[in-house]
Image (tube, rainbow, N blue to C red):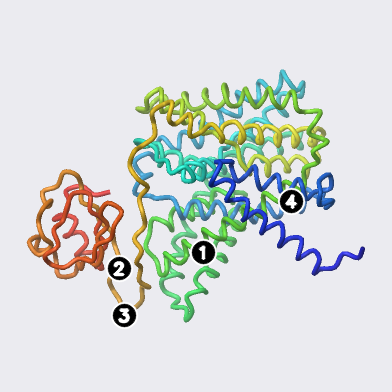
Amino acid sequence: MIITFEFILIIVAVLILLSVVVSKVSERFGVPLLLLFLTIGMLAGSEGFGGIYFDDPFLTQYISIIALTIILFSGGLDTPWRSVKSVVKEGASLATFGVIFTAVVFGVFAYFILKLTLIESMLIGSIISSTDAAAVFAILRSRGMNLKGRLTPLLELESGSNDPMAVLLTITLISFITNKNESILAAIGLLLLQLVIGVIVAWIMSKISLFFINKIKLGYEGLYQILIIGLLFLTFGAATLLKGSGFLAVYLLGVLLGKEDFLHKRSVLRFFDSTAWFSQIILFLTLGLLVFPSRLVPVMLPGLALAIILIFVARPVAVFLALAPFRFTIREKLFISWVGLRGAVPIVLATYPLVAGIVHADLIFNIVFFVVVISVMMQGTLLPWIAKILNLESREPPRKKMPLEIVAGELIPSELKEIEIPTPSTVDGKTIVELNLPPGYLVVLISRAGAYIQPTGNTVLKSGDRLLALTENDALEQARGILCNKCD
């Protein structure tokens, strides 16, 4: 049979459609999407029903870099800065020290179980050290669950910010293995240099990006998304060429842009949300195709042992040490430990030794893949049960987004802004007209107990109401002072 371009296009389309359809399985039964997407890729591979032979780690790495760049940027852009700013120190500790502690503890056990060199074992620990809490929230949303206290913002911040550290450790150790003359101090210096350059490039590019987005005045709204894609890849390329961390730079670029207001922000957020999902599907399918199930059989026993060590030893040790200076209960730390699902990033990083030509690269890839699968199956499946056992499930319903937006422009100086009336509140029981709100603050919609109210001047406000108003910045600050003493 002659393989034509059209035939390849149909195969790709079928795999994508299957991936979208099986997402319903995740919603209904709580099976992590990562596992489903990987399974489709493996079934379509050379040892599956599809019979597609794919064994190209170089192409896989190129696809992975592009996909991860978009996924990390989207994660940063979606990071709710107002909620995570209260846990920045805790999240930063988990994303740095937590990753390092996980890598070291896991690496020590890998050294004794796999009988590799210590540096190779530490490389495996570095590869496996980052978490994928996005999978966690997909499971929680499918079950309609919310978490108590600061757990949600902390896990959101950790999941988005710990991938760059794992990448840095992996690249540094590979450089150390392939360059025998490199000293440990030089490797540490390289790591610090990549961190510093990544942060600087992200900050500079955020300023440039905001200037272009708000000042260039493009004639078509859809071009703003294309503009940001260009700025995103420019950020990654510039940071990488300057010997910095491109992944850290694009994530921070997303965070810095996400906390600012810019033209067509809501449409940009929606665009990158769908683009990130598409990137995840392509990434997982590619990684699934790269796996040969028969090669996993010899590593099943050591892989299972290492997976258990990761779940019950390495991750808890890392969490308890990283959060030791902060106020978290034992139950919260135990839950955060259980939420340490591994995701796509460790599998992607496992292709780096293959590309670098390291001696035991095949063993490293297969071990990492097997550990990730066990982690997702065990931790992901039992996650809702663990939350209930530890009594960390919140009874509050998920917060809904207001079903209204406007497109900012030169003729509309005002923007839609949201304020939530605290509980208790001195404005409870008062009408809007009684409050003497500033002239530049116009309430256009009220969200109350899951319903939406179109207000008039005589509408009575209640504690917990969320007010969506068309306002300018000065009027917004005055309104905050009237409506609440302390708003999020």
Would residue 14 appear left or right of 225 to someone viewing this image? right
Secondary structure beneath disc 3? loop
Residue located 51% across and 64% down the image: 271
| Label 1 packing within 10 angstroms: few (<14), some (14-19), many (20+) | some
Q: Where 52 falls versus 328 (above or below)? A: below
Give the secondary structure at mark 1: helix
Give the number of the mark in front: 3 or 1: 1
Query: Who comes first in sequence, dot 1 or dot 2?
Result: 1
Cα–Cα span, label 2 and label 3: 11 Å
Write the residue at 77% across / 42% down.
Answer: 291
Q: 52 or 359, which lies in front? A: 52
* Residue that mark 4 sits on: 60
Question: What whole-number distance in Å separates the C-alpha atoms at marks 2 and 4?
Answer: 43 Å
Crowding at label 2, few (<14), some or many (≥20) Cα neighbours within 10 Å? many
- Amino acid at pointer 1: Phe
In the rendered view, tell whether residue 120 sits above or below residue 58: above
Spatial CA span between label 4 and label 1: 24 Å
Marks 2 and 4 close (CB-CB < 8 Å): no
Q: Residue furthest left?
A: 434
Work out whether 269 lies above or below 169: below
Q: Which residue is mark 2?
A: 415
Residue matched to label 3: 411
Q: Secondary structure at mark 2?
A: strand
At which x and y percent is residue 58?
77, 51
On the image, the x and y values in percent for residue 132 come to 56, 41
Residue 307: x and y in percent read: 65, 27
Q: Using the rendered view, name the quadrant where residue 414 is placed.
A: bottom left
Amino acid marked by disc 4 = Thr
Q: In terms of depth relative to the viewer, which is nearer, 49 or 263?
A: 49
Taking the view exactly as shown, the residue that stands out farthest to the top is 112
